[in-house]
Amino acid sequence: MKPVVDLVAGARPNFMKLAPVARAVAAQGRLAFRVVHTGQHYDAGMSDVFFAELGIPAPAVHLEVGSGTHGAQTARILERYEAHLLAAPPAAVVVFGDVNSTLACSLAAVKLGVPVVHVEAGLRSFDRTMPEEINRVVTDALASLLLVSEPSGLANLAREGVEASRTRLVGNVMIDTLLAHLEAARARGTAASLALEPGGYALVTLHRPSNVDDPRTLAGLLDVLEELSETLPLVYPIHPRTLAAAERAGFLARLRPGRPRLRCLPPQPYLDLLSLAAAARVVLTDSGGVQEETAVLRVPCLTLRDNTERPVTVELGTNRLVGSDPQRIRAAFADALAGRWPAGQDIPLWDGQAGARVGHEIAAWLGA
Ligand code: UD1
């Protein structure tokens, strides 16, 4: 009998990370697996479409927890996942990234003596006001095997006292997904279907609580975006959190679809977002994943945050931290348009083979 591992996903960025690992584990044939979906993200456009596009097997377990406060959502996942673990304990639980589902499933597992493997371990923004930073620190403290995407992760874990025998640099599984779908994404021509010239627009994604939850911050960012859109059309898929925040603050009209130079769209399927990112002149974002994707696509990326847990995207990639100050955003945007920007370099192990390395490391560690 092959050892069974649970592959856990809950929120959108998890799906792109789980897909290549599921594929590799199936191809290697050393382990069996169950896909567990917590239901943290549940809209068809935030979840189902990714399973379909990325060929992820239907979840064997679906916890259907939905949205809530951090405490309520985490508690629901804990309680519901524990019941599944008790009924059919796997040999290990594999969690991805830094969302609430990552933390909750790790905690449920270790309390029952089921070891946890963390894919994308060791990243640190050193900003504990970010919910993801709490999730990263706690998950890494609970995990037995820590699989790391970039060198900073190894250094952070070593500094925190994690033995090197439990850490491995395996590369970036999300980039496996990008490389596997890039040709199809380019062929999709999403920009052209929106009547945008390839290279003639900027892509915007913003959803962090620190940028969107406070009405004054969000209004200030929308002011800058409107200003920049006079120079270059912007295309802006709106995350449900941002939409909800804009509605609460009473400026939903500023995000209405149909404005020619600030093109607000619903959340985009994976292939369309990749298509838009690959052909953008510049990207403005607060997403961790988009910082990594633009580094590989060699597209200038302005990160509207003061810190990043992915420093390799700044050191070797095309990422620059600009915060939320309009003056800095304006200046960086001008630099990007003028070509005053690093061209970017290859990032070691972001090569499309990270999922295979993850599969082999887990199988070897379980003695399979
Ligand atoms: C979560 C992750 C974040 C990740 C992001 C990617 C945590 C703490 N945060 O943030 O790290 O970058 O996902 O998308 O885990 N909503 C819907 N439909 C859905 C899901 C959410 O309408 O399918 C709305 C709800 O109003 C919900 C809000 O979005 O309250 C926030 O969702 P939640 O999963 O709590 O956090 P995200 O902001 O999506």
Image (cartoon, rainbow, N blue to C red):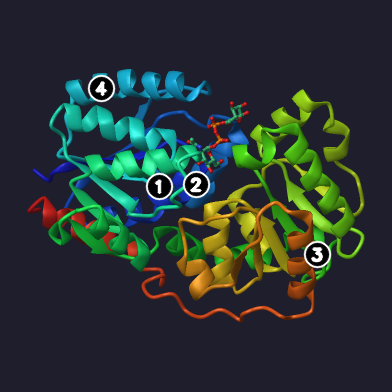
Q: Indicate the secondary structure of the residue bearing disc 4.
A: helix
Q: Nearer the viewer, mark 1 or mark 4?
A: 1
Quadrant in the picture for residue 164? bottom left
How much space separates mark 3 and mark 2, taking CA atoms? 24 Å
The kind of residue tagged 2 is Pro
Q: Which of the pair 295/184 is nearer the observer?
A: 295
Which badge, 3 or 4, is on the more N-terminal residue?
A: 4
Kindly report the distance in space between the C-alpha atoms of the residues bearing marks 3 and 4.
47 Å
Tell whether label 1 touches label 2 (CB within 8 Å): yes
Which residue is under mark 4? 82
* Identity, as a three-letter code, of the amino acid under mark 3: Tyr
Disc 2 crowd, CA 10 A, few/some/many (<14, 14-19, 20+) = many
**In this figure, which residue is indicated by the disc labeled 2?**
13
Q: Residue at x 40, y 53 (%)?
A: 124
Residue at left offset 29%, top offset 62%: 154
Ligand 1 within 8 Å, label 1 CB: yes
- Crowding near the residue tagged with mark 4, few <14, some 14–19, many ≥20 C-alpha atoms within 10 Å: many
Give percent across and percent down for residue 218.
Answer: 75, 40
Badge 3 density bin: few <14, some 14–19, many ≥20, Cα 10 Å: many
Identify whether 25 is placed above or below 295.
above
Tell me: residue 69, above or below residue 56.
above
Task: Residue at 72% x, 80% y: name it.
Answer: 340
Q: Nearer the viewer, residue 293 or 143?
A: 143
Q: Identify the mark at residue 201; answer none if there is no mark.
A: 3
